């Protein structure tokens, strides 16, 4: 349902590498901004990392299929901006940005308009 999708958009799962819970008040990362949203050619994803960490950004369609992996690598603590420029064959619609570190994952919806 729409309510469940909205809850999922705000969901943050945090676990330590050992499998224990991480203090949710001090997440490893936070998504600061998605701009513009909706977007046409590209969207900027601004992220704050509390500590050095490997980060992977994946994009899924509404059926849960992976459509792109715009970035994957190790980043230092601080603010980083990633960009997603979808391929020309991707249809207009809603997509889910899935950002993860070893201890946390976050999802946010974005809308592509052509």
Image (cartoon, rainbow, N blue to C red):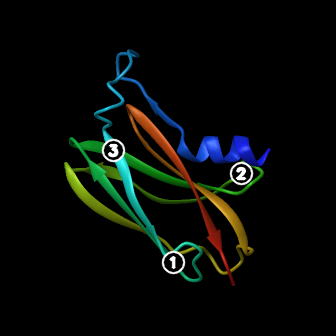
Mark 1: few, some, or many residues within 10 Å (few <14, many ≥20)?
some
What percent of the width, then of the height, locates residue 24? Answer: 36, 30
Indicate whether 109 appears above or below 17.
Answer: below
Element under label 1? loop
Q: Which residue is mark 3?
A: 29
Indicate whether 23 appears above or below 40.
Answer: above
Q: CA distance from mark 1 to mark 3?
A: 22 Å
Q: Which residue is mark 1?
A: 42
Mark 2: few, some, or many residues within 10 Å (few <14, many ≥20)?
few
Q: Choose the circle earlier in sequence order: 1 or 2.
A: 1
- Closer to the eye: label 1 or 2: 1
Q: Which mark is residue 65?
A: 2
In depth, the one of 53 and 48 nearer the eye is: 48
Question: Is 82 left or right of 65, judged from the image as shown?
Answer: left
Query: Which residue: 53% across, 53% down?
Result: 58
The N terminus lies in quadrant: top right
Indicate whether 16 appears above or below 113.
Answer: above
Q: Choose the circle earlier in sequence order: 1 or 3.
A: 3
Q: Choose the circle earlier in sequence order: 3 or 2.
A: 3
Question: Is 98 left or right of 72, judged from the image as shown?
Answer: right
Element under label 3? strand
What percent of the width, then of the height, locates residue 89? Answer: 71, 77
Kindly indicate the quadrant of the structure image that contains residue 41: bottom right
Query: Which residue: 49% across, 44% down?
Result: 106
Kindly indicate the quadrant of the structure image that contains residue 102: top left
Q: Are the two marked residues, 1 and 3, in contact with CB atoms closer than 8 angstroms?
A: no
Q: Which mark is residue 100?
A: none
């Amino acid at each position: 349902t729409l309510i469940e999708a909205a809850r999922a958009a705000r969901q943050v799962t945090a676990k330590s590498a050992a499998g224990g819970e991480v203090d949710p008040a001090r997440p490893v990362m936070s998504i600061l901004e998605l701009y513009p949203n909706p977007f046409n050619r590209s969207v900027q994803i601004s992220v704050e990392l509390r500590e050095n960490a490997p980060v992977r950004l994946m994009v899924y369609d509404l059926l849960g299929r992976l459509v792109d992996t715009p970035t994957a690598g190790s980043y230092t603590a601080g603010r980083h901006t990633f960009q997603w420029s979808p391929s020309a064959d991707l249809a207009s619609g809603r997509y889910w940005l899935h950002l993860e570190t070893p201890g946390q994952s976050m999802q946010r919806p974005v809308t592509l308009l052509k």
